[in-house]
Image (cartoon, rainbow, N blue to C red):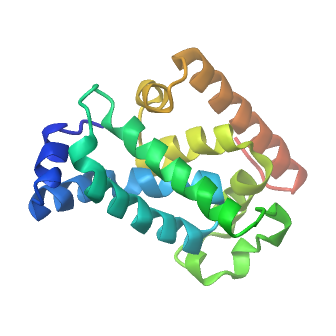
C-alpha cells in the first residue's frame, strides 16, 4: 500500500480532501487490523472512528519515516488497548456468535462465516492480524511485515501456521478444506 506521506502535512493544515483521500486509501486495511485485535464489529468501528480522529488531530506531529501505515497501526492499537483497559473488559472468544450477529449478515456463505469465526477465535492476535490483512485487504506479505515491524520470514511462517491451524480446525468441524 503506497501512502503519500505529504497527506499528513496537508491533513495537519486542515485539508479535508487530503483526510478523505487517506481514509479512502486505508479504510479496509485499518478495519482488518483493528478487527484482528478486538474481534468485534461495533468495537472495530468505534476504534476506527477514534483512530481517524486522532490521526486528524495529530497529523501535524507525523514525521516522515517511510512507514505511515505503521504509525496509523500504532495509534489504532493504543486506542484499542486503552478502550479495553478503561472499560475493564476482556475479549472473550466464547461470546462470539458470528452466525447470528447482524454485522456479519453480509456474509451469505456458511463456510465463509465458519472460517471467519474460526480465524477470530482460534488464531493468536499476531496470526489474526497477518491473515486478515492478507485476506481482507490484499496486502502483500512484505507490506504486512514492514507495517507490523516484523521480519518477512516471521510474517510468512505465522501466516502458514495460521492457515494450518484453520485447516485442522475446519477439518475437525467436518468442512472439506483444500
Is residue 174 visible to us here? yes
Q: Please tell me which residue is depicted at 19% across the width and 37% down the height of the picture.
A: 5
Is residue 33 visible to us here? no
Image quadrant containing the C terminus: top right
- Estimate the x, y position of residue 126 in percent, counting from the top left: 65, 38
- Estimate the x, y position of residue 30 in percent, counting from the top left: 43, 53
- Estimate the x, y position of residue 87 in percent, counting from the top left: 69, 70
- Estimate the x, y position of residue 110 in percent, counting from the top left: 68, 69
- Tally the numbered discs: 0
Residue 39 in the image: above or below residue 45: above
Q: Please tell me which residue is depicted at 13% across the width and 39% down the height of the picture.
A: 6
Q: Please tell me which residue is depicted at 60% across the width and 57% down the height of the picture.
A: 82
Q: Is residue 48 left or right of residue 157?
A: left
Residue in front for this viewpoint, 116 or 43: 43
Quadrant of residue 127 in the image? top right
Q: Is residue 92 left or right of residue 55?
A: right
Image quadrant containing the N terminus: top left
Residue in front for this viewpoint, 109 or 82: 82
Q: Please tell me which residue is depicted at 36% across the width and 58% down the height of the picture.
A: 54
Quadrant of residue 102 in the image? bottom right
Residue in front for this viewpoint, 114 or 17: 17
Name the residue at the right extreme: 172
Residue 132 in the image: above or below residue 158: below
Q: Is residue 48 left or right of residue 58?
A: right
Amino acid at each position: 500500500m503506497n501512502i503519500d506521506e505529504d497527506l499528513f502535512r496537508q491533513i495537519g493544515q486542515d485539508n479535508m480532501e487530503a483526510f478523505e483521500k487517506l481514509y479512502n486509501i486505508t479504510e479496509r486495511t485499518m478495519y482488518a487490523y483493528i478487527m484482528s485485535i478486538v474481534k468485534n464489529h461495533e468495537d472495530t468501528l468505534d476504534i476506527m472512528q477514534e483512530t481517524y480522529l486522532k490521526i486528524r488531530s495529530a497529523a501535524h506531529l507525523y514525521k516522515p519515516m517511510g512507514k505511515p501505515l505503521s504509525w496509523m497501526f500504532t495509534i489504532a492499537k493504543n486506542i484499542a488497548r486503552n478502550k479495553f483497559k478503561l472499560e475493564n473488559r476482556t475479549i472473550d472468544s466464547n461470546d462470539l456468535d458470528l452466525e447470528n450477529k447482524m454485522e456479519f449478515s453480509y456474509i451469505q456463505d456458511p463456510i465463509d462465516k465458519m472460517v471467519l469465526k474460526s480465524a477470530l477465535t482460534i488464531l493468536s492476535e499476531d496470526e489474526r492480524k497477518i491473515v486478515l490483512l492478507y485476506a481482507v485487504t490484499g496486502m502483500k506479505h512484505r507490506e504486512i511485515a514492514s507495517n507490523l515491524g516484523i521480519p518477512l520470514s516471521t510474517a510468512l511462517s505465522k501466516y502458514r501456521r495460521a492457515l494450518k491451524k484453520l485447516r485442522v480446525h475446519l477439518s475437525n468441524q467436518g468442512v472439506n478444506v483444500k
